[in-house]
Image (cartoon, grey):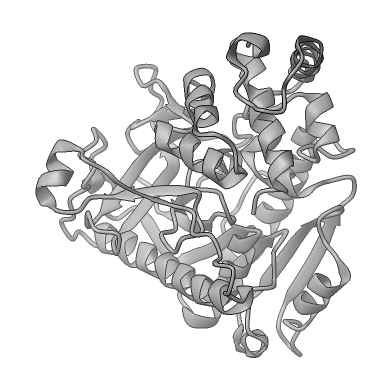
Amino acid sequence: MLPPKLHALFCLCSCLALVHPIDWQDLNPVAHIRSSAWANKLQALMAAASVGQSNIPKGNGPYSVGCTDLMFDYTKKGSFLRLYYPSQEDEHHSDTLWIPNKEYFFGLSKYLGTHWLMGKILSLFFGSMTTPAGWNSPLRTGENYPLIVFSHGLGAFRTIYSAIGIDLASHGFIVAAVEHRDGSASATYYFKDQSAAEIGNKSWLYLQSLKSEEEEMPVRNEQVQTRAKECSQALDLILAIDGGKPVKNVLDLDFDVEQLKDSIDRNKIAVIGHSFGGATVIQTLSEDQRFRCGIALDAWMFPLDDEIYSRIPQPLFFINSERFQYPANIKRMEKSYLPGKERNMITIRGSVHQNFADFTFATGKIVGYIFTLKGDIDSNVALDLSNKASLAFLQKHLGKKLSIF
């Protein structure tokens, strides 16, 4: 889940200063920026905010990391994934674009309630940001890797948890970040038919807004059930490829999908998610026993039915931020604590909800702190604590030996 709309807007606006200085007086994309004095102050604030940590970090593990996108079945019923994986040493592949299509910026702009011009500006100035993973780099073969299926938050999409995906892959995991098509992503796409797929004519789906007469709980509950099915479907497809089934990537990228044959350790599969994705973790564990354990990052528990908590036999780990969580949400987490079942919970002091997503690295200290994209704790430290805790949990329950500390 993204933070309140104003917070996210300022996060994205502040990112512009990282790429190119903006003359807000000339562009004037936001109606309430009236006077040149106010525009100059805002520009100065954003320029100051860009000083400090602003880059998505490399993984801390011993493996090089590659990245590709996979789409199986061109319709919206198919699976759409961003894959992070241990790669061969390769200097010929460029880093991966963080947000690869301008429509994602339009989706964010729509979600934020701003003029469409904001999406155009964001795409122009922010669309060149990359993540430290080799695009379509060849898989490092000769090993069987544990598999992680990752579920994004409300208003997010498959690419904006790259810091987590890259770090896990650098420690020898394959990470399949699902792009959900339940109406909870700010934007996603599919193809209407085979011919549209062949020429790259995308059909876009944007965030599904609640209608005025709709109650939120039934909508979110239906979505979380759809999301869980999408996680299981992603697992089905990865395991089918691992087993040698010929599957065509609709996106027709340079990455050879057949590299994934015999690459997965089928006894070491887990699910991780953030916010709405944290609820998706719990729903998925209750429905699919192939997932050996789950990690819920700052989970938003609202979408889940109460009876779900008694149907989770697998180990479950809650990693919370200090400033997002509230008593009612924690009580829902406690309902999952069952006799004889492993449940763990930690809170990272000084952290905020967006410390788990890449936005915390895409803004500077001032704006990031004021608009709760950064907490009192350094963003790199917060991510490192979360990742090390996750790796220790995965090592215990999947049996993969790791050099964490």
The quadrant of the image that shows the N terminus is: bottom right
Residue 277 location, quadrant: bottom right
Q: What residue is rendered at 41% in x and 37% in y?
A: 103
Q: What residue is rendered at 73% in x and 43% in y?
A: 355
**In the figure, 401 relative to 293: above or below?**
above
Q: What residue is rendered at 53% in x and 58% in y?
A: 151
Q: What residue is rendered at 77% in x and 35% in y?
A: 379
Closer to us: 242 or 192: 192
Residue 126 image point, x, y percent:
54, 23
Q: Is residue 16 left or right of residue 380?
A: left
Residue 313 image point, x, y percent:
61, 84
Residue 23 location, quadrant: top right
Q: Is residue 82 left or right of residue 305?
A: left
Residue 90 image point, x, y percent:
38, 22
Q: Is residue 179 left or right of residue 239?
A: right
Can residue 21 be spotted in the picture?
A: no
Residue 153 image point, x, y percent:
59, 55
The quadrant of the image that shows the C terminus is: top right
Counting the numbered discs, the total is 0
